[in-house]
Image (cartoon, rainbow, N blue to C red):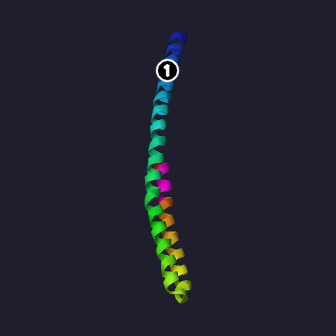
Amino acid sequence: MHAVLAMWTVLATEATQAADAAAGLTGDIGSIGAGLVFGLGAIGPGIGLGFLIGKAIESMARQPEAAGMVRTTMFLGIAFVEALALFGFVLSFIV
């Protein structure tokens, strides 16, 4: 009876080690995938922020009297664009 129990313990240990080895491989690939998801997800908001801030500065230079309204709208736009970057960040944890 003890020999059978010992055999099952050894088999369970080997199965656990094999599963850990397989999970290690998936973890490495998963971290690469998460990096790609976040990196590619940050490209769009980066371009969007550059375009948004550049156009806001251009419009403030053309019409200084409207600078307050443009600045408020720019900050709202920045908040929405940064939300997209945060969605990419969260998605990288899900993948």
In the image shown, does 9 or 4 lie closer to the viewer? Answer: 9
User: Who's the residue at 44% across and 50% down the image?
Assistant: 37
Residue at the front extreme, as displayed: 62
Instruction: Look at label 1 and name its amino acid.
Output: Glu
Residue 1 percent coordinates (x, y): 52, 11
Was residue 32 drawn as part of the magenta stretch in this picture?
no
List the residue tagged with mark 1. 14
Mark 1: few/some/many CA within 10 Å (<14, 14-19, 20+): few
Q: Is residue 17 above or below residue 72?
A: above
Q: Is residue 91 above or below residue 30?
A: below
Was residue 92 drawn as part of the magenta stretch in this picture?
yes
Q: Main secondary structure of the magenta part?
A: helix
Magenta residues, as a range?
87-93
Residue 17 percent coordinates (x, y): 51, 24
User: Who's the residue at 52% across and 82% down the image?
Assistant: 61
User: Who's the residue at 55% across and 11% down the image?
Assistant: 2
User: Who's the residue at 54% across and 75% down the image?
Assistant: 75
Q: Is residue 87 above or below residue 30?
A: below
Tally of numbered tags? 1
In the image shown, does 95 or 48 lie closer to the viewer? Answer: 48
Q: Is residue 14 above or below residue 26?
A: above
Residue 31 percent coordinates (x, y): 49, 42
Residue 72 percent coordinates (x, y): 54, 80
Residue at the bottom extreme, as displayed: 65
In the image shown, does 84 or 67 lie closer to the viewer? Answer: 67
Q: SS at mark 1? A: helix
